[in-house]
Image (cartoon, grey):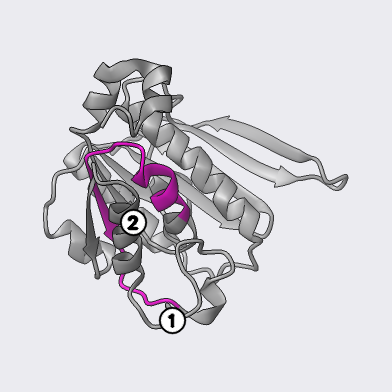
């Protein structure tokens, strides 16, 4: 196993790599962010990964949801991403849950970290409520157009900061999806490996009028929940 993870072992040693084998995560959503997260975290050595999504692949998904290819139309996204993880890394157990988040939560599967890869505010609100209930942190990520947001939620509350509405996302450029998922994956991996992580800080990434990538950071207040 250590030979498979050779470059990571060089980074943090065999003890930390072995620690990752005991960790369990759930990725809520197996589309744009979820596909990229499956690649980024699926072969990192995390012991157990649960992929949750009720949706099937559509033709217009394929250009930005990198786990899918032509011919995958009408197949369940969770099934494909879980299989992809298993094929790439024999040292991880991956599970597909073809259901929505509320149905997954009822299964009461124990995890160390929840990762948001959804595309709507009500589900993120439900994730926040569930994370508070089971006292586990979660990693938020969202994308729209060329912009994105990332935050490691621990003591702050998503529902106290964001107005929960049904909002149809605008168009999305594929590279920003992979970029935001990469930042989420780095936060998740550092946390699971026992490394320092800046918590409850919202990072907003966008391109200014000159085409320069900018990042604004906002410290979030602790929750009253």
Residue 54 sits inside the magenta stretch = yes
Q: Is 170 drawn above or below residue 85 in the view shown?
A: below
What is the secondary structure assignment of the residue under circle 2?
strand
Residue 77 sits inside the magenta stretch = no
The residue shown at (36%, 22%) is 9
Screen quadrant of the C terminus: top left
Q: Is 173 drawn above or below residue 213 in the view shown?
A: below
Figure label count:
2
- Left or right of 132? Residue 107 is left
Crowd rating for badge 1 (residues with CA inside 10 Å; few <14, some 14–19, many 20+): some
Between disc 2 and disc 1, whose residue precedes? 2
On residue 73, the disc is: 1
Q: Position of residue 160 (x, y in %)?
A: 41, 45
Q: Position of residue 183 (x, y in %)?
A: 52, 39
- Left or right of 201? Residue 82 is left
On residue 28, the disc is: 2
The residue shown at (47%, 65%) is 165
Please report the bounds of the magenta region as a residue range.
Answer: 36-57
Q: Position of residue 214 (x, y in %)?
A: 73, 37
């Amino acid at each position: 196993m250590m030979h498979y993870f050779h470059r990571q072992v060089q980074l943090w040693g065999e003890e930390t790599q072995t620690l990752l084998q005991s960790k369990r995560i759930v990725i809520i959503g197996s589309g744009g962010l979820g596909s990229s997260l499956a690649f980024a975290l699926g072969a990192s050595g995390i012991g157990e990964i649960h992929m949750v999504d009720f949706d099937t692949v559509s033709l217009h998904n394929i250009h930005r949801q990198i786990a899918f290819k032509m011919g995958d139309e009408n197949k369940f996204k969770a099934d494909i991403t879980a299989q992809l993880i298993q094929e790439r890394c024999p040292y991880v157990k991956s599970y597909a849950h073809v259901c929505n988040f509320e149905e997954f939560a009822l299964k009461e599967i124990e995890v160390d970290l929840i990762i948001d890869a959804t595309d709507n505010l009500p589900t993120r609100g439900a994730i926040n409520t569930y994370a508070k209930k089971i006292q586990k942190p979660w990693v938020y990520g969202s994308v729209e157009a060329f912009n994105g947001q990332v935050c490691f939620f621990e003591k702050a509350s998503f529902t106290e900061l964001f107005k929960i509405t049904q909002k149809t996302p605008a168009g999305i450029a594929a590279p920003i999806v992979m970029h935001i998922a990469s930042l989420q994956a780095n936060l998740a991996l550092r946390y699971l490996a026992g490394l320092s992580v800046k918590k409850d800080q919202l990072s907003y990434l966008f391109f200014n009028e000159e085409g320069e990538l900018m990042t604004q950071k906002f410290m979030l207040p602790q929750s009253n929940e």
